[in-house]
Image (tube, rainbow, N blue to C red):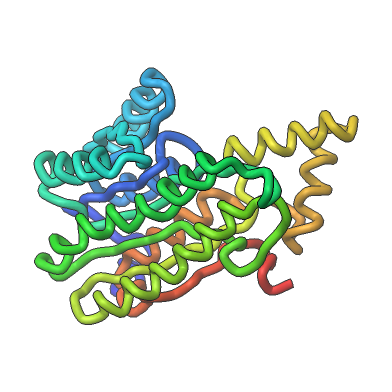
Amino acid sequence: MENDEALSPSLRGRRALVTGSVAGLGYAVAHRLAAAGADVILHGIEPDHVARAAVDRLARESGARILLSRADLNDVGQIEAMMAQAEKDLGGIDILVNNAVVRHFAPVDALRTEQWNEALAVNLSAAFHTVRLSLPGMRARGWGRIVNMSSVYGAGATPDRIAYITTKTALIGMTRAIAIEAARTGVTCNALMPGTVPTPPIVERIAGLAAEQGISQEAAAANYLRARQPTGRFVAMDSVAAMVLLLCSPAGADITGAMLPVDGGWTAA
């Protein structure tokens, strides 16, 4: 029976916040949590009609209560307001997935100061503030799951991604620190390290490479993945979402402070 519950856990009565979840990987994670019964706050700054459509779609497909936050994660005041609204509307957050991210591609000496500051704010500081504001309630209830979305670039580097690599590496240190502080409270904190996932920014980047090289998008994608993932294919967004669900299941109770690759063998190679 316990094994069945671990494979298909019920999250009914749990409240989840997934940042950066109106589309892409964050939406896939939110969909998994809602399908398991959790009430979910979607978050994103996409155009209003796009965000509202995502809320309506997820509510219709899951039957769960789905709310929306439009907080700008560059602004600590807006993060605090988002968390206060979660407390008011849902009674707190039990599952926190820090997924929001910005990417800037430039060499160290060409990255603009405002791009560096934005990456620090959205990719790193926002995760600190959401944990800071949700952890007391998790401790009080004796249960909580925090998942910080790092990257394979938290364990390695490549040119022209200084802000992304720095923040994704720092998220791993933050994860370890939180996990140790919360180890005896019923709260776990882990970092996932996805490889190349077909999110809209990645698909757009591959389309740009195809145009530059005068080849098809399929050929550009094959070249892009061949240099990274031994499987030669994208990591499925639902595979990452399934790992989040596992961490929220009884099987995840003793997994904390871990850096978990979901990367098609990238880090092994």
Check the image and name the residue furthest to the right.
214
Left or right of residue 112, residue 10 in this image: left
Q: Position of residue 87 (x, y in %)?
A: 12, 46
| Residue 61 vertical position relative to residue 258 in the rendered view, above or below | above
Q: Is residue 40 visible?
A: no
Q: Position of residue 197 (x, y in %)?
A: 61, 49
> Can you give x and y, in whole percent of width and height, for residue 186 in the image?
21, 74
Q: Nearer the viewer, residue 84 or 53?
A: 84
Can residue 155 be seen from the camera position used here?
yes
Residue beneath the point at 45% across and 63% down: 171
- Above or below: residue 110 compared with residue 174: above
Q: Based on the displayed image, in which of its 4 quarters is residue 106 positioned?
A: top right
In front: 155, or 62?
155
Q: Work out which quarter of the rendered image holds the N terminus and state it.
A: bottom left
Which of the 4 image quadrants contains residue 193?
A: bottom right
Residue lying at 56% horizontally and 67% vertically, measured from the top left: 261
Quadrant of residue 63 within the rendered picture: top left
